[in-house]
Amino acid sequence: MIPVIDEEECTGCGTCIEICPPGAITLVDGKARIAGDLCEECGFCAPECPVEAIKIPFPLKGP
Amino acid sequence: MERYPHIFQSGTIGKLVTRNRIKYAATETNFPYGDGYVSDREVAYMEAQAKGGAGIVTTQGAYPDKKGEGKGFKGMMSINDDKFIPGLARIADVIRANGALSSIQILHCGREGGIELDYCLMPSIVPQKLSYFKPPREITATEIKQAVKDHVDAARRARQAGFDMIELSGIVGYLISTFISRYTNKRTDEYGGDLKARCRLMIEIIEGVKAEVGDMAVGIRLCGHELLDDRGGNTFEESVESFRIAQEAGADYLSVTIGWHESSQSVITRDVPMGHWLYIAEAVKKAVDVPVMMAFRQFLPHIPEKAIAGGQIDFVEMCRPMMADPEFPNKIRQGREKEIVPCIACNACFSRLYYHQPIMCSVRPNLGHEGEEEWGYYGFKPAPKKKKIAIVGGGPAGLQCAEVAARKGHEVTLFEKNDRLGGNVLIASMVDAGAIELMRPIATLEELCRKAGVSIRLGVECDPAMVREEAPDALVVATGGAMKGVSGEVLTPQDVMVKDRKIGQRVAIIGGGGVGLGIAVYLLRHGEHEITIIDEGGKPGRDVNPFYFWQYMALMKKKKVNFMKRTRMTAIEDGRIGVLSPSGEGTVEADSIIMSVFYPEEEVWGRKASTLAKEVYFIGDAKKPRRIINAIHDGYRLGMVL
């Protein structure tokens, strides 16, 4: 699952850019953006975000 | 003549008879939904495991309690309510339909539980060593009774869902193990004290479950060696005795595991020789009469074959090797060993679980997509239009792309300039003990490519002119990354590890990613060097899996490697490197300077490529330098759409 960035919350601090193993995150207009074709969906970025702006869209509800 | 007669003899567990001695062991996947319901994805994955030919297929652990204190993973399956029975029954059904016996694991994660709560339950408060887990709260006597009841109720649901066996789990820090271990159980009531008392929770659960579902076989996984000697864990003798106590309580089979998650010792990484832990299973087997089984680094079939023949184990359990290839049992039975997609113990699967991501496999991109036709787990549909495809580069990305494209019916030619396939994996495979295993998927891909009809042209340096002559419909550039500024006195990883260039005493490595750390590890294993690693980022090794990262960093610390973080190289002259760091300008003196930073391929193919064929693609490091998982997945995903 490719993480989702809440642009309202993102401060553009760059912490996730530093942590991302495949280097899939860049800053675009001061906000983190994940390149879908490079993201390997490891999820390492989410817990590192100091303002919890990165969410893993885990499917919470079963049928 | 059967090549593995001991693996492929039938076995017995309680009153049940198995078709062979292979058990797919319980593995969390994060495929189920966050509320505990089984998903289609999980059913398809389990179906693939059952079709693969194992004698017993175990489900992932399902947590038995209502509060979620036993829940250790965001997408962990639940068995805490009757409403989950229909979903669980789907798993039991697909296992039965494919001729395997089914075992469902009931798992209370204990010290690693309470994933959505702000605490975890433990017999006594022993602070977490791994920061990921929740702060412990001491379980009350009433809650212990409830935990036993939860397991018993879960067992009833398991029978209603149609499973053949029930497996309990008391390993690595899960609830039962925290009671058994002296390290985490400091209780003064009847659940603490000597080993027998510390095993009381386990005994009550086994006896309770047996009383509820007496007609089913009930097994348990326990720690054969906690590897917690530095923190006052159980002795090896106590651990072995805990298996005997479990048998006495009624366990029908015993699964031997090694280490806790917080043990400070390698257990399942490549540096641990295959079959290393069998002596522990053997010690358990000598102490008990019921079947004994073990997983742990038995990746090559001759290892369990010998272990079963020699009486060390009765069954071999497989987790990672069968995640990488569910067809492992069928392939070794049919003499198709060379086609096994081999686990490389990279543990990408494992670490993903703790980041709330479904498991993924470096070497098998279709893991978790078994039910989706376009991913081709059961074979690909032929491509609508047969194309002529030229792939430049015989590393993991090029090979994987070639294999998939050829299976879809395309005419594929793969060019490799070296006389051996593997690309940068040839270098990576030399870094540390066991790294040679990284070449196993290369050998498999070579075999599968040949079988699929790929024309492999070794020792041919394909350039744009050659592509023009070949006139393919599609060109795939998989040449690996490129380096900048390596002329003169600056060496490449290739120079150091393949060409055996002489390396001086003082070494500067530019770049602190996986490649840079790999070079440092390689050098430190072969000699004494004073190493400085100059890294522009603030976190060296961000692309190294945590399972290996801590080992590498421990070695670096011991050998006093100097890390210069957030530091940029500005100039190189006569062994002096000009650097710019947050504290200002400076120089680093070195006898050898090694570049470890790769860039996407641009020089040879970059701009020209689009003029060479109608379709042009860059994959692997040529697209962007990354890890083996990205190379293989790039190749596979491109192959799917070609």
Image (cartoon, helix red, strand yellow):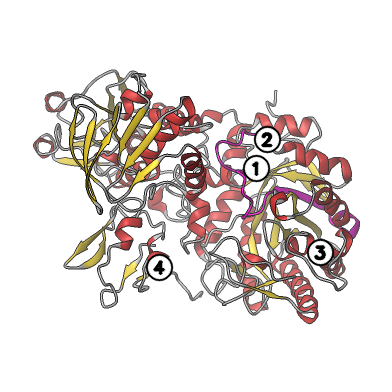
Q: Are there few (<14), some (14-19), or many (20+) residues within 10 Å of tag 4? A: some
Q: Are marks 3 and 2 on the same chain?
A: yes
Q: Are there few (<14), some (14-19), or many (20+) residues within 10 Å of tag 3? A: many
Where does the image place residue B186, in percent across and percent down from the top left?
A: 78, 67
User: CA–CA distance between discs 4 and 1?
Assistant: 31 Å
Circle 2 is placed at which residue position?
B276
The residue lying at 84 percent from left, 47 percent from top is: B237
Q: Earlier in the sequence, mark 3 or mark 2?
A: 3
Where does the image place residue B76, in percent across and percent down from the top left?
A: 57, 66
Circle 1 is placed at which residue position?
B296
Q: Are marks 3 and 1 in contact (CB under 8 Å)?
A: no
Between B386 and B180, which is closer to the camera in this rendering? B180
Q: Is residue B272 above or below residue B326?
A: above
Q: Are marks 2 and 4 in contact (CB under 8 Å)?
A: no
For residue B254: magenta?
yes
Residue B91 visible from this viewpoint: yes
| Dot label at residue A56 | 4
Q: Are marks 4 and 1 on the same chain?
A: no
Q: Are marks 4 and 1 in contact (CB under 8 Å)?
A: no
| Dot label at residue B202 | 3
**Amino acid, disc 2:** His
User: CA–CA distance between discs 3 and 4?
Assistant: 36 Å
Q: Chain of mark 4?
A: A
User: CA–CA distance between discs 2 and 4?
Assistant: 37 Å
